[in-house]
Image: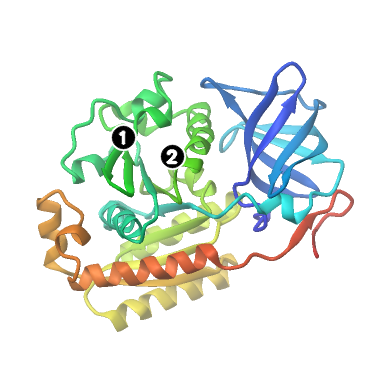
Amino acid sequence: MPHPGWLPNKLIYLELPGRGRVQSRVLGLADKVLILLAPAVEGKTIWPNPGTALTVVLSGPTGEISVSGTIVDRKLKPFPLLYLAVDEDIPFIAAVAARPRKIIAIASGKGGTGKTFFCLNLGWQLATMNRQAILVDLDLGTANLAAALGLHPNLDLSAVILRNKEFTEILYPISSGLTIIPGAARNKDFADLSTWQLQRLAAGLGSLEPLCDHLILDTSAGLSANTTTFLYCADYVVLVINDTPTSIIDAYGLIKAMASQFWVPPAGIIINRASNQSEAAEYAGRFIHTAKEFLGVTLDYLGAIPEDNSATQSLKATRPMLALYPWAPASESIKTISARLLEKLTSPQPKQILSANANYVQSL
């Protein structure tokens, strides 16, 4: 199933009989059919039957356009999805003009690679570049983003999971440009959410998009649905690995799991705690070649972060390394990686339309 590069995570609206307008998100495209995240209202999933006729509303630079469609299928796994056959072409300008690529998911094949460390410092760097960044700790069950900042919040993601609060009610400002949403770390039950709970969280991320320039997701390590659900919601995935055989193998397993189930969004890798820049680049090159040859997945190499005592000291001080040691070697590497990542997010996308009468995406 191809990823719709021209419609990544596009927030759209569905007008349903008896329901009015509800928000959804485009996740895929196959055989003239849009794959959509099932909408949720007040924590409850809307689950229309196949055969339901509806209207799709997309925002553009000069207003809205509407196209008609019909629900042709629905699936529960990996999370609740609706399959929508559209009756008309969707113009490129309306499809992408109001959808800048802003969701960055930070992932790793195993724990201990420095994923949260990178996530925090990436957010800090983007904030220093006068961009508004929101960090969401989705490392369910073992969340530690708040702890890395020395915070003890009264509310965290568990309040959203339990339907007591919305995402926008648990925002904690860290600096003028950086805000976090603490993860649910108090209950091990949150480490294995149901497909419905995962769907509500994924749908709820849409409420944060208008509030920031970049939405950074600190996802769970490993291959569970807690990880892959949110990676599929990303405009770009950053895979954090170490230059060790086990880290490489686990990271490859994550990419393989995503590619075999659906697709792999645009993605790049970084080598953290690298002992040598040239060796790190060699490790990355082999990884990228293997992913391309055996999985058909193209990955970017974003760079390496060297082993640096400043990182350890910043963790002990519960502060971002870039705040305490902005000129440390590891900090300089993160600045470079951040700039490369922004280039990937802002690079032009192909001008295409979804043709309602062909089994392919037609280039303009």
Identify the image quadrant of residue 245.
Answer: bottom left
Give the x, y percent position of residue 330: 22, 69
In the drawing, does residue 114 fall left or right of residue 270? Answer: left
Label 2, secondary structure: give it.
Answer: helix
Tell me what residue is drawn at x 36 percent, y 79 percent.
Answer: 281
* Residue found at the far bottom of this picture: 278
Give how far apart the Cα atoms at labels 1 and 2 are. Answer: 10 Å
Give amino acid for label 1: Gly
Q: Which mark is residue 150?
A: none
Give the mark, 1 or 2, whose residue is nearer the N terminus.
1
Seen in the image, is 356 located left or right of residue 119?
right
- Does any portion of residue 129 appear in the rendered image? yes
Q: Quadrant of the C terminus?
A: bottom right
Q: Quick check: 213 above or below 205? A: below
Q: Are marks 1 and 2 in contact (CB under 8 Å)?
A: yes
Q: Locate residue 47, reporting x and y percent.
A: 66, 23
Q: Which element is circle 1 on?
A: loop
Residue under pointer 2: 226
- Colour scheme in the image? rainbow
Q: Amino acid at mark 2?
A: Asn
Q: Is residue 349 above or below residue 276?
A: above
Residue 163: quarter of image: top left
Q: Residues within 10 Å of mark 1 (few under 14, many from 20)?
A: many
Q: x, y (%) of residue 41? A: 57, 22
Q: Is residue 243 visible?
A: no
Relative to the observer, which residue lies in front, 354 or 32? 354
Q: How many marks?
A: 2
Q: Which mark is residue 141?
A: 1
Residue 230: x percent and y percent? 48, 44
Q: Residue at x 36, y 69 (%)?
A: 337
Q: Which residue: 73% across, 37% down?
A: 57
Q: Most extreme residue toward the top, as rendered?
A: 18
